[in-house]
Image: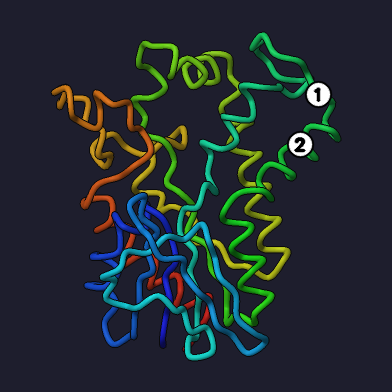
Amino acid sequence: MKINFLGNSHLGTIAPALTKAGGAREISHFISRTYGTVDATVVGPQGDATIPWIKLTESTHYGHTIDLGAADVAVAVGFNFSLVQIVKLWESFQPVDAIGDYGVPSLGEHIWDKYVDAALDATFMMRTLKMLKEVGSPHLVVIPQPAPAEWVSTRDGDRFAIYRDLVRNGDWDRVRGMFDRQVRRLEADDVRVFEQPSDTLTEHGFTKDALAMGNPAETAEDSFYARGDFYHMNRTFAGHVAPAFYEWLDEAIPS
């Protein structure tokens, strides 16, 4: 099986583990970097296109052209498809039946769903999937951005207040349900979604703190925790995800 992985920094975290656990599979990684200078190009049976939001480095080992015609599976990783994105939307509007009061205008259920759908459709993830389909992609798989580290729900500071409030008010499960609805939307569009392994999650659906790059025990000024990074995970996380992903993939898309 030949697999092309496309993603941002969240793919960068798990790419070494995916390669190591890949066995006989032929694996290529196309990782968008903030310091990248070359736009990725995708080539498929129905044409080719440039993806300007996937910025590759000059020295990428896999080149700058993603050949979908030669691949069995294309896997999109991260690209703002996440619980974090749902929370950001909640900071501007809240559903009318929310338990807590967040000091923002309320939207009725139908309008709220449209609001969330439109915002997620504008993410790099949805735009990438659309482009892959247009040029003629093989099987499409999505690995969402990991759930936030659990400490974000208890840490002081304005930046983390929305997570604390969602949990304290009893609305966090509603956020999780909204993200699950987006997963179901993708699956209805013939995109398979690899959901985060349960052994990496707390009972409330946060990533376990020990798996986050932002370690609460490391508070140096330049640490991930000090910078408030609750969304990037570490190599231990990658070691959990990679074998679970291939086990899932072999059932979802038999070679």
Residue at position x 66%, y 39% in the image: 178
**Which residue position is annotated with label 1?**
107
Residue 175, horizontal then vertical, whole percent: 61, 32
State whether residue 128 is above or below residue 174: below
Q: Secondary structure at mark 2?
A: helix
**Left or right of 189 on screen, residue 243:** left
State whether residue 209 is above or below residue 240: above
Q: Secondary structure at mark 1?
A: strand
Q: What is the crowding at mark 1: few (fewer than 14 residues within 10 Å), some, or many (at least 20)? A: some
Q: What is the crowding at mark 2: few (fewer than 14 residues within 10 Å), some, or many (at least 20)? A: some
Q: Earlier in the sequence, mark 2 or mark 1?
A: 1
State whether residue 143 is above or below residue 83: below
Residue 127, horizontal then vertical, whole percent: 63, 59
Specify the amino acid type for callout 2.
Tyr
Q: CA distance from mark 2 to mark 1?
A: 9 Å
Labels 2 & 1 near each other (Cβ < 8 A):
yes
* In-front residue for pair 212/70: 70
State whether residue 142 is above or below residue 255: above
Residue at position x 64%, y 30% in the image: 89
**Left or right of 215 on screen, residue 154:** right
**Which residue position is annotated with label 2?**
115
Specify the amino acid type for callout 1.
Leu
* In-front residue for pair 139/8: 8
* In-front residue for pair 29/212: 29
Quarter of the image where one finds residue 193: bottom right
Residue 173, horizontal then vertical, whole percent: 58, 31
**Left or right of 86 on screen, residue 105:** right
Quarter of the image where one finds residue 60: bottom left
**Left or right of 182 on screen, residue 12:** left
Residue 2, horizontal then vertical, whole percent: 41, 86
The N terminus is located in which quarter? Answer: bottom left
Counting labels gives: 2
